Image: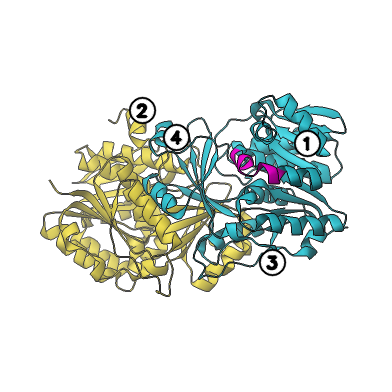
Chain colours: A cyan, B yellow
Amino acid sequence: MKKYQVVGIGNAMVDILAHVEDDFLAKHGVEKGIMQLIDTDRAAELYGVMGPAMEISGGSAANTIAGMAALGMRVAYVSKVKDDQLGGIFSHDIKAQGADFDTPLAASDHPAETGRCMVLVTPDGERSMNTYLGVSEFLSPDDIDVGIMADAEWIYLEGYRFDGPDSHAAFAKAITACKGAGGKVSLTLSDPFCVERHRDAFLTMIRADVDLLFCNEHELMSLYQTDDLSIAMALGAADVDILACTVGERGAYITQGGEEVHAPAAAMHVEDATGAGDLFAAGFLYGLTSGRDYLTCGRMGCVAAGEIIGHIGARPEADLMDMFAAEGLV
Amino acid sequence: MKKYQVVGIGNAMVDILAHVEDDFLAKHGVEKGIMQLIDTDRAAELYGVMGPAMEISGGSAANTIAGMAALGMRVAYVSKVKDDQLGGIFSHDIKAQGADFDTPLAASDHPAETGRCMVLVTPDGERSMNTYLGVSEFLSPDDIDVGIMADAEWIYLEGYRFDGPDSHAAFAKAITACKGAGGKVSLTLSDPFCVERHRDAFLTMIRADVDLLFCNEHELMSLYQTDDLSIAMALGAADVDILACTVGERGAYITQGGEEVHAPAAAMHVEDATGAGDLFAAGFLYGLTSGRDYLTCGRMGCVAAGEIIGHIGARPEADLMDMFAAEGLV
């Protein structure tokens, strides 16, 4: 048995969450519903005008890993935080949830700080994310412990990491180590604009190495440059073994081996959409690594996503296993 | 017109909030429902065993000032944070709420960090607080701007500050400046064990200078060393002009000039009791500074307290003025 069921690699973030009205977004140049990368000056400017906030550990793949840890899975996370207060908070929270997290810290004299994401939640529950990558940008191949990757049934790669200078090389090192030991590779596309920035690199990796692709409809259509989801699904299904595409309130479609199943969304009030995709992946991977069929995997993903959108923050608060049980999934 | 309606002085804290079961408290030596002062070693130990958390600006008087700022009052806060990430978060949140906060920062080479409070919330909504004072302990008379104190209709002093080495002298300086310019002095007893530690100093200040005393029944009975609330109320009423004593789910009693009124508690689900007393004071002072009678002041206090216990964190989320309007108070 491998030590880890899933090892995730992503950008470590502390989310700075605040409620805003829609006109705040317009006034301050924040694009609604997507992730924008911002530099230190813009981060200071935006923080200066936003209202009181709360801080909760986030980061897309980190949320997924935390969700799997909450489900009792054997998981580890790989990312870069600094030896600063926010880095301490991030490290505490993911380890306290039960994940291993041993990536070397950026030293306290590193010019950047631990990454943070200002998440502005509008009354409709939509989140608009403004990400200061900080030291998370500097994860390098040196930070990839090949022993950990070889000891993983699955690795889970965060698309947002394509934005870092050494990230492609770091991913390649992780993939080689994982696949060389018989492990499998999953990837999340993360964001349609991230896909836009790195489409060729995404496609190259997907076609060469990815066994399981997570995405939402907008990301998938961006990847294949089409506005027809069924075309994008067909192209995706040809490129990977398993394609799991969430479609918002309609749930998710999963295709594998020429068969497509539809998992309906769990009925939930949308308080804060942050982390819905991340927790879908957590629930899906729980199902997959415990031998469930793809429909059950998809339903587990939808239930986990439903939990996370019902409250502020992208780390689970309710007992996900109890929720699976209530739906007859376990 | 004075620049400020209320200026608060207290310990600046970032709350680190986590849900725990009751047996966690017993296992890790945390006394339920009160505030315990802890040192850096104990803070690290407790943080190491507690689960994932979220961070929200707190601090008792700071919560009160934030509540009044949310009600549109002219308020300022005086306290010590460091030039570190948590200090930046604290400063942002209280200023973004609309309060002035210009106390000089502790330098980045100060051996202590910005204060924090690990708030462990049990399923009954009770909060058990573990406070690392950090640099907030070192607020000195030098940090008291007499111009600000002279320009305040009321100053609001946090009882927890009696624990700091220079705090009594700092309070004395603030009181002299405020009273010398015709302002009035309010004090909150904060915590029964804090009262126990500093009973003589509390009584001396109360009898000499305090016009309005906030407390709950346990604090007041501790102050006067009696287990009979009516005796404690009578003794308190003899020592101050206005006595406002909260009594949990029974609301609050206010005595002034030989008359006592009872304000019933607002009916609310208790999610997290953190900040109930702080927001009672905010609502009460809103009423007082806008010329309401004491019953209305008390009811405003109870409505504001009811808002804060309905969610995690001790800073208001709902529109308090709307809630006052719904109760026919404005």
Label 3 is found on which chain of the structure?
A: A
Which of discs 2 and 3 lies nearer the camera? The answer is: 3
Q: Are labels 3 and 4 assigned to the same chain?
A: no
Q: Is residue B118 left or right of residue A68?
A: left
Judging by the rendered image, the residue that carries numbered circle 4 is B267
User: Helix or strand or loop: what does disc 1 sit on?
Assistant: strand
What's the CA distance linking mark 2 and mark 3?
Answer: 60 Å
Q: Are labels 1 and 3 assigned to the same chain?
A: yes
Q: Nearer the viewer, residue A6 or B145?
A: A6
Which of discs 3 and 4 lies nearer the camera? The answer is: 3
What's the CA distance linking mark 1 and mark 3?
Answer: 31 Å
Which residue appears at 51% of the width and 61% of the height?
Answer: A113
Asked if the magenta segment contains residue A201, the reply would be: yes
Q: Name the disc covering residue A243, or none.
A: 1
User: Helix or strand or loop: what does disc 4 sit on?
Assistant: loop
Judging by the rendered image, the residue that carries numbered circle 2 is B326
Mark 3: amino acid: Asp
Label 1 is found on which chain of the structure?
A: A
Mark 4: amino acid: Ala
The answer to which of marks 2 and 4 sits earlier in the sequence is: 4
Which residue appears at 65% of the width and 35% of the height?
Answer: A219
Q: Name the disc covering residue A142, or none.
A: 3
Where residue A141 sits in the image (x, y, percent)? 69, 63
User: Helix or strand or loop: what does disc 3 sit on?
Assistant: helix
What's the CA distance linking mark 2 and mark 4?
Answer: 13 Å
Mark 1: amino acid: Leu
Which of discs 1 and 3 lies nearer the camera? The answer is: 3
Mark 3 closeness class: few <14, some 14–19, many ≥20 residues within 10 Å? few
Where residue B278 sits in the image (x, y, percent)? 37, 50
- The part of the chain drawn in magenta is A193-202
